[in-house]
Amino acid sequence: MVRSVSGKRRVASIMPEQNSPASSHSRAVRLWLVAAAAMIFLTLIVGGATRLTESGLSITEWKPVTGVVPPLTQQAWQDEFTRYRAIPQYRELNEGMSLGQFKAIYWWEWTHRLLARLTGAVFLLPFLFFLWRGWIPRGLKARLWTIFFGGAALGAVGWWMVSSGLGDTNRVSVSQYRLAFHLTLACLIYCAIVWTSQQVVSRRIPEVTARLRYGALALAVLVLCQIYLGALVAGTDAGRAFNTWPLIDGAFIPDAARLWFATPWWRNIFENLLTIQFDHRMVAYLTWTVALLHGFDAGFSKVDRRTWTEAMTLAVLVTVQAVLGIVTLLNVVPLGLSLAHQGFAIIVLTVAVSHAERLSHGVRAAQVPASAALSRS
């Protein structure tokens, strides 16, 4: 590892031979992880559309294997439609819906489930190949297996979420508790893949202050928390209430009696529409403030150009996301703006996690063992 010092800047460089088998195998592993992350990103976008179009309860059965095949005959479609008409959502929201209208919401949910299955295949099959070839660094094997089993658990959590709107219930949508948990678990898996993808190839690692490192990590955590709160907003349709800004319910900080009227008090965080939206706003303000301070800190700390660019880019992205959220709220959550707001949140999360990983350590990143690469190439 070679270090160069210039003023207050110090950069660590890990540079294996560019044409070595270890280097090419590292790039292949990273490409696989990036592809898996892209699949999760797409699944998250379609999942958001599925929720916003109230399509998540259109498929009332969980068939992990045979469910990949959609209805292929008119009778099969009628059977699916009959099962849907037996749940509360149809009776309360969509009574009188035509078969054609049902197909529209069915395809959203089916596509979401198909993408989830494909994502699992995109992750597992190359992973097994790379394990067989010895291209996975020893220190990453346990982490990658954890990510895989986390993805498998995510499928079960998804059905657990959907089941909250089926059967003996009065709900016309899935539980916001389960929706938020499902989305956050998916984002955690996504973050783990993005984080890991940066640790399997050689790169220059900046030497920065502990304050910058912790600030970058805090931003990533805040963005993830904000996504969780956003899921509560989406799951309760809280965005369709209190469509004013900067005031909410007539004040910047609403009356405590209205924020905390439910008992026990913690239920307000998950069930009180005013509290749910207020929390989402306040964490947005906090995230924006931390992003700006982090960007200015990077500028005044005389870090390398890439670190400063990343910090300022993140500040700009958080600002754009905040403005997009305000515009979505003031327009009473139209579908197009809602999808843009949700999708852009994943982009912000991607940049935040990538930036935090790059600043998180000044030690060697995990590398594909050259001995294994040479012996099995």
Image (cartoon, rainbow, N blue to C red):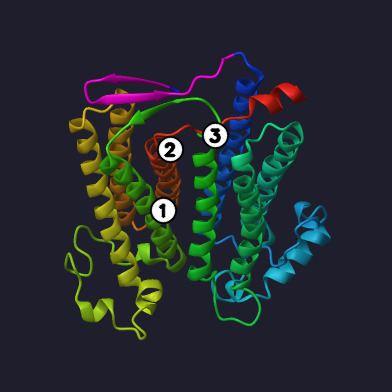
Dot 3: element: loop
Q: Residue visible at 29% across and 45% down?
A: 215
Percent across and percent down for residue 283 are 29, 58
The answer to whether marks 3 and 1 mark residues whose Cβ atoms lie closer than 8 Å is no
* Magenta segment boundaries in residue numbering: 2-18
* Secondary structure found at label 2: helix
Whether 322 is drawn above or below 63: the answer is above
Q: Can residue 40 be seen at all in this image of the molecule?
A: yes
Q: What residue is drawn where x is 57% and y is 30%?
A: 367
Select label 1 or label 2 by which is in front: 2
Real-space Cα separation, disc 2 to disc 3, in angstroms = 16 Å
Res. 21 image quadrant: top right
Q: Residue 366 bears which disc, if any?
A: 3
Mark 2 is on which residue type? Answer: Ser
Q: Looking at the image, is mark 1 or mark 2 earlier in the sequence?
A: 1
Which residue matches tag 1? 224
Q: Nearer the viewer, residue 38 or 87?
A: 38
Locate residue 283 relative to residue 145 in the image: left or right: left
Proximity of marks 2 and 3: CB atoms separated by less than 8 Å? no
Q: Is residue 350 magenta?
A: no
Percent position of residue 255, x then y: 19, 76
Residue 275 occupies which quadrant of the picture?
bottom left
